[in-house]
Amino acid sequence: MGKRKEESVSKSGGHKRLRQEDADKYDDEPDEAEHSHLASGSNSCSQLTSGEVGIIESIQLKNFMCHSMLGPFQFGSNVNFVVGNNGSGKSAVLTALIVGLGGKATTTNRGSSLKVFVKDGESSADVSITLRNQGRDAFKPDVYGDSIVVSQRINADGSRSYKLKSKSGTSISCKKEELVAILDHFNIQVDNPVSVLTQEMSKHFLQSKNEGDKYKFFMKATQLEQMKDDYSYIMKTKENTSLQIEQGVERLRELKQLYMEKKERYRTIGFVNEMRNYLEELKNKMAWAVVSEAEKEIKPIQERISLEEGCTDKYVQKLSEWQVKVNEAEEKYKTIQDQLKKIHEEAQLLQPQCVSLKSDLQAKRRAYNEAEVLYNRFRIELRRLEKDDIQLRKRIEELKNSAEQVSDPEKLERQRKITQLKEQLKVFSDQETVIGQQLQQFQQAIYKYKEEHSRLKREELEVKQVLDAKQRQLKELHGSKTNQLKRFGQHMPALLEAVEEAFRQGRFKEKPVGPLGAYLHLKDAELTLAVEACLKSLLQAFCCDNHNDERTLQALMSRYCSPGIRPQIIVNRFRNEVYNVRCRAVYHPEFPSVLTALEIDNAVVTNCLIDMRGIETVLLIKSSCVARKVMQSNKPPKNCREAFTAEGDQVFERRYYSSENTRPRFLSKDVDVEISLLENEVENKKAQLLTSQQHLHSIENEIRQNEDYFNQHRQHQKELQIKLRRINVEIMDLENVEEHQSVDISTLVDETQENKNKMETVKGDMQKQKVIMEELKNNLQAAEHKLEEIKDKIHQVEEVAGPVKDELNQVDSEMEKCKCHWQHYEEKQKQHLASINTQKELLASKEKKLKEKIAQAMQIYPERIEVDRTVKSLDTEMNRLREKINSEADRHGNRDEIIKEFCEAKDKYEDAEGKVKNLKKFIKLLDKIMTQRYKTYQQFRR
């Protein structure tokens, strides 16, 4: 692994990278000998004895892998064998050499991240490696001394830091670039399998049958790959050298100009007077050149003003067009609103009629039902009287036939029994009537309790659902104390870990951002509920850069999210800069917008919320009264679409919606208070559920008890009915017995006549009742018809109102859009007019200055001079002439000094010219050498 400085190694290894100090040497002392040296390969490398530089002298490990302290190990200058039992640290030493000298974790085949090398339970691991730095090829021996100590600390989060120390322990550098320079200088390649061959690499090399893998191994092993990198570095250095040549050429021009100036001074010592005359002429030109430049400055301003004034009509036209559209939209909105108002008024007028007709219909239906019941009673009574009439006629006939055959004692006994049975019949009949009433009462009570039972069951189900939701939310809040992401769902941490893993595997082009609520922080905690009411489900949403990433994220969500609660996915091209919304954002001196009330950690999240919710146009106003005043009493602030209150209520210009939520769920900071409040609510819901269940239990007991009573009384009623039927049969049998008795037939005849009279009366009453019933039935049908007509009218009004409402909302949107366009062009017109005024003010100022400059030029030289040179060039030449005149005036007293300056300028110019020529020759030779070497490199690769 160390660099063995032998001739064979030097020849096959090629050159080290051309360091900056070597490039500087070529810049300073380019000659043909050095060019020949570069072309001749590496034969000029210093021949050192084996083991003087780059040898690993020792290594020490602390908290590395499973070792608390390992080493220090002292290595010899030649071959070293590391032996030991399994787990003693052999592989740890080799891994530490790779990692300690800047190798990646993947190179060791022991892990994908450096954090796996930190011993469990420790916060960091330390690796210290000592490299020999002796001999003529030592690396900065005056700085590091005879050895270089490379110390590296690996933190538990996977980061690492370097310290490069001298032999005495002095810290020299903490940069990885310095370590790379040392490794390049010593030709130490930790990723070259010839230098460091790990177990996995050796297995892969022996087992691999892929020619490409072996060719890559060959490229690394023969340092052809390093040679390719060196050639790339040389070409880059060549580009830097070419850039330095260009800078040298520029510097050469300056030296040449200086040289020509000195030469001119040398030649023109005797022409001072001519130069002074020429200076006066230049002053006159300068005066009018200033005037010409001022006029040139004025001309584009005038053109811009003319152009801007020409565009003014366009803005006025646009404003007029959008004003007309706004007026039309407002008129249309007002018309539709009036139409909708008339429809509502018509519906409100029909509603009392509908209620009145319903009441009238119910009253007429009751009257009809009562009349029908009375009619049925009359009909039943008539049938009973007809039966009695038939029975009386039969009885009279029977009595007439058997009057002579009946004896008095038997007759009296039958009458006594009949009387006794009738008394029993009356008692049982009264009992049956009472039991019937009780059965009806029990049935009504059972129906009432069952209705109450159904209502309580529904309430119990609702309370259970609310309780389950509260308990889930409480569980999420408890989990969020250790992991804030659990506030957005128990599945969220696992989902984000899966997204991170998929991103590392390259399944995402851009890592999805979400949940969006995790990136939001409120400046004012009192507005938390308002922000949640505004953003709603967007707080749990994710944002993807493209549709392929969206499909991948949907596949992950299907594994981790329950059906029905999958977060929303928004596809929006990622940008690292937040949109510029100053022209369309709402500004209010007292109340913030949602955008300004939030501190958002990610520009993608900000842009997504601007696109999806327009948070720059939504105001947050704590008081609902103030919100109504701002949004509805007066015209809403510019660019403001809606507002939200601290209670979560939503306020539009013409509408107001109350919030269903009472507390924030995702963005509140005080989790303990939320947990306490939620626990109280859960306890209250549990107590409510317990009370409801107890009430349900008592009602179920009442239902069972009443059903038992009902069944007992029903059984008793059946028994009484059986008794009544038996007694009726006995009475009929006694009455139908043929006996010889004396009967007062005239009494029965009177009863028959009386029964006939009753029948006639009942028939008359029944006929009257039928007429009344028919009249009530007609009234009922008429009332039902009227009610149906009113319902049809109300239904028609509602059907008409639906499209009108939709049209009203559409017109409202159009009106808002037109207002936005009108405000946009109004703002543009203001900016345009302000720009014209600014240009006019600038023009007036320039014209004033021009008049002053013309007056000054007239004083200097009355006649106008047309000058085709710039003021700057004239000023430069005048300054140069003044300097020449002054120098010539001074030179008359010291001629030798002027000659000396001329000679120095000449020498510098010729020296710089020679260096530039040599560097150009070197670049040309380097191109030729690199071409030859590239051909040789291609031959090696074959």
Image: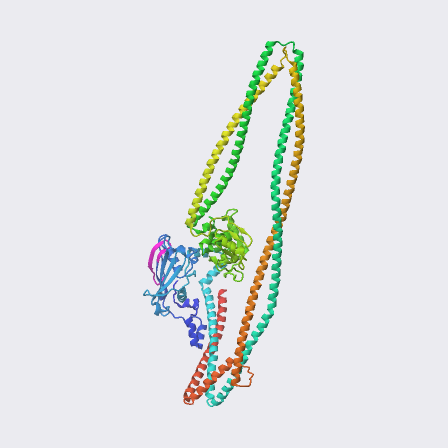
Magenta run includes residue 63: yes
- Left or right, 677 with respect to 564, comes to left
* Residue shown at 45% from the left, 75% from the top: 35
Camera-side residue of 813 and 392 = 392
Q: Tell me, what colour scheme is on the image?
A: rainbow
Quadrant occupied by the N terminus? bottom left
Magenta span: 61-78
Residue 315 in sight: yes
- Left or right, 933 with respect to 429, comes to left
Camera-side residue of 474 and 259 = 474
When the figure is inspected, residue 227 is found, relative to residue 199, above or below; the finding is below
Could you tell me residue 772's position as x and y percent?
66, 32
Could you tell me residue 534's position as x and y percent?
51, 53
Could you tell me residue 213's position as x and y percent?
48, 59
Camera-side residue of 641 and 231 = 641
* Residue shown at 57% from the left, 76% from the top: 299
When the figure is inspected, residue 117 is found, relative to residue 865, above or below; the finding is above
Could you tell me residue 199's position as x and y percent?
42, 55
Residue 391 in sight: no
Magenta run includes residue 223: no
